[in-house]
Image (tube, grey):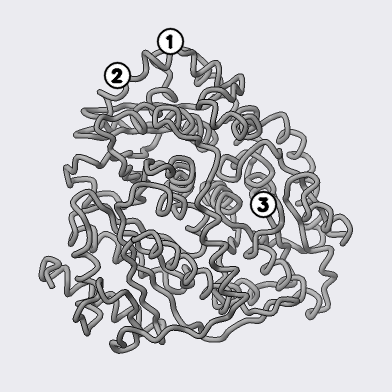
């Protein structure tokens, strides 16, 4: 039996008291469980009518459990024990949480960085199966990764078809192509579930189950949670969490998510995509900020910040200030946050199932790949770092530190800083340490995202949400580029186009963007960290 708990204080509690009675009167819980597409208004009805399958995960997912178990046993008998997942956004974040929480190994490849792809290829190819997850198969990242692994298997004398497993929607171009190619297995997910709600569908279950996670127990927990969430009652914690997220007045639209020993490895990163992509549109929405315990945002007292603390089920933690405290098992928490996000969408007056601004960066990247323009000259070079930005932002800055100070100077009192890093998150993972430092310098929420995966997550909020952000983009010259079989561009060219395209879209919307390219990654990371420390030591003053 799953255990879920929720407590709120101050502004969050006021939002619960104000909004939950109306949600109960409107029978939102039972209507949601009945997959009523009218809950979000007439403009959302068509999309919602084909996006509510996540509320009945067993229908499509239970039959997969045995199939996944048998395939895992077959692969193990052949000595194939390493699972690589090629997926983006919802296709990668949920399996990473599920396997991390279960303590089983899964190599998640959700990057187009040449160094990251090369590292995934370099380890245990003889023992590797790759799971390629994409609703349509048209996702350029996963298609490029599939092509590369297929070629690598063949070059190593391995029957590539026997090492490729596909997860996709039924009837998709990838579904048809994979079956025609004779790949090892093709699993179809429920087509009536969007990517960020797909944790308990084939997209979450296939790679996790092949890696050894107990996916049957995960589904059991989720179904138990649905029982808890189905009551039209004021103590329904799904309604309460949804009200706390979407119903504060004025809206606390920066939701700082802190894991304080929940035991759910990486859960805030999964929740980040769910919330940002579901709510960030029409000039409103909720910006999730994944932060560390004791992060500056949690003690800022800012009027636009709500802190969500994730704790263990046996914790006696209580909310203080403007906080909520949430606990539960993984399957239960996934269902709870999906339910609450849908409720928050109703309160915000938006459609929580579309992502109208995600495509803009993809279009820009494709245009750059087709045109292949020359790289623009940097505004200046400081050590190993090329600095690019509009003159009105950079001004007379001539050092990396001064350029950073200029960007922070463009931050409004209700704004946020978004750090977007297009590097290898394993090799350059220490760079995430600048997030809390810059949060302390600015006194404002700071997000940190690895590119290009954040384009399938917070990227929607950056373009569709309120125009409150300033953006620090970090790219780097790879040690060695990597060709993509059958494509006229390399991984290096692809990730460069994705970064440039996203920066272009943000700039076209009038958002301040400072771009840093590390000519030498190791040296550049050290120089960037030193520049941030300098700002921190001087309080961020230019």
Q: Helix, strand, or loop for circle 1? A: helix
Q: Which mark is residue 18?
A: 2
- Label 3 to label 1: alpha-carbon separation: 41 Å
Depth check: 401 or 99 in front? 401
Q: Do the residues labelled 3 and 1 touch (CB within 8 Å)?
A: no
Q: Do the residues labelled 3 and 2 touch (CB within 8 Å)?
A: no
Q: How far across and down, in percent of the image, does residue 306 sit?
A: 28, 39
Q: Helix, strand, or loop for circle 3? A: helix
For label 2, the crowd category at 10 Å Cα-Cα, with few meaning under 14, some 14 to 19 and many 20 or more, is some
Q: Is residue 532 above or below residue 345?
A: below
Q: How far across and down, in percent of the image, does residue 12 sit?
A: 27, 29
Depth check: 160 or 23 in front? 23
Q: Which quarter of the rendering shows the C terminus?
A: bottom left
Q: How far across and down, in percent of the image, does residue 276 sit?
A: 43, 46
Q: In this view, does 57 lie above or below 152?
A: above
Q: How many marks?
A: 3
Q: Residue 266 carries which label?
A: none
Q: Residue at x 40, y 41 (%)?
A: 262
In the figure, residue 436 lies in which quadrant? bottom left
Q: Earlier in the sequence, mark 3 or mark 2?
A: 2
Depth check: 367 or 232 in front? 367
Q: Helix, strand, or loop for circle 2? A: helix
Q: Are marks 2 and 1 in contact (CB under 8 Å)?
A: no
- Label 3 to label 2: alpha-carbon separation: 42 Å
Query: Pointer 3: what residue?
Result: 207
Query: Pointer 1: what residue?
Result: 25
For label 3, the crowd category at 10 Å Cα-Cα, with few meaning under 14, some 14 to 19 and many 20 or more, is many
Indicate which label's residue lies in the foreground, 3 or 2: 2
Q: Residue at x 43, y 18 (%)?
A: 236
Side (left or right) of 215 relative to 93: right
Side (left or right) of 46 relative to 279: right
Q: Which residue is drawn at 29% across and 66% down?
A: 434
């Amino acid at each position: 039996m799953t255990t879920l708990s929720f407590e709120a204080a101050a502004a969050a509690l006021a939002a619960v008291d104000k909004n939950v009675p109306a949600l109960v009167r409107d029978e939102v819980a039972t209507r949601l469980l009945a997959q009523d597409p009218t809950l979000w208004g007439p403009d959302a009805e068509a999309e919602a009518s084909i996006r509510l399958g996540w509320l009945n995960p067993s229908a499509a997912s239970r039959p997969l459990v045995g199939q996944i178990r048998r395939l895992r046993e077959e692969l193990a008998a052949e000595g194939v024990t390493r699972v690589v997942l090629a997926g983006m956004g919802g296709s990668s974040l949920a399996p990473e949480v599920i396997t991390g929480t279960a303590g089983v190994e899964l190599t998640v490849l959700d990057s187009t960085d040449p160094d990251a792809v090369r590292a995934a290829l370099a380890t245990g190819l003889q023992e590797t199966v790759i799971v390629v997850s994409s609703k349509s198969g048209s996702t350029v990242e996963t298609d490029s990764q599939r092509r590369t692994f297929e070629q690598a298997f063949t070059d190593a004398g391995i029957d590539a078809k026997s090492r490729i497993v596909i997860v996709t929607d039924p009837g998709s171009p990838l579904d048809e192509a994979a079956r025609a190619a004779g790949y090892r297995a093709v699993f179809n997910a429920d087509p009536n579930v969007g990517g960020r709600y797909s944790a308990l569908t084939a997209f979450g279950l296939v790679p996790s189950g092949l890696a050894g996670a107990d996916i049957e127990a995960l589904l059991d927990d989720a179904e138990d949670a649905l029982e808890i969430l189905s009551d039209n009652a004021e103590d329904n914690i799904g309604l309460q969490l949804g009200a706390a997220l979407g119903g504060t007045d004025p809206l606390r639209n920066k939701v700082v998510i802190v894991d304080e020993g929940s035991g759910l490895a990486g859960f805030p990163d999964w929740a980040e995509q769910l919330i940002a992509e579901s709510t960030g549109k029409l000039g409103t929405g909720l910006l999730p900020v994944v932060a560390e315990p004791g992060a500056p945002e949690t003690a800022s007292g800012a009027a636009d910040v709500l802190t969500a603390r994730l704790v263990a089920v046996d914790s006696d933690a209580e909310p203080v200030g403007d906080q909520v405290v949430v606990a539960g098992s993984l399957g239960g928490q996934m269902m709870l946050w999906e339910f609450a996000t849908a409720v928050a969408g109703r309160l915000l007056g938006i459609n929580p199932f579309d992502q109208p601004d995600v495509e803009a960066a993809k279009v820009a990247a494709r245009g750059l790949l087709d045109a292949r323009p020359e790289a623009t000259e940097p505004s200046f070079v400081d050590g190993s770092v090329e600095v690019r930005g509009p003159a009105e932002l950079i001004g007379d800055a001539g050092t990396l530190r001064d350029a950073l100070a200029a960007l922070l100077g463009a931050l409004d009192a209700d704004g946020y800083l978004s750090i977007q890093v297009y590097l290898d998150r394993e090799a350059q993972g220490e760079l995430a340490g600048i997030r809390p430092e810059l949060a302390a310098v600015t006194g404002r929420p700071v997000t940190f995202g690895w590119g290009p995966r954040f384009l399938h997550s917070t990227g929607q909020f950056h373009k569709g949400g309120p125009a409150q952000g300033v953006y620090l983009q970090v790219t780097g010259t790879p040690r060695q580029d990597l060709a993509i079989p059958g494509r006229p561009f390399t991984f290096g060219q692809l990730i460069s186009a994705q970064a440039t395209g996203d920066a272009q879209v943000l700039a076209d919307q009038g958002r301040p963007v400072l771009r840093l390219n590390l000519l030498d990654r190791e040296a550049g990371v050290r120089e960037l960290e030193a520049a941030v420390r300098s700002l921190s030591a001087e309080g961020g003053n230019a």
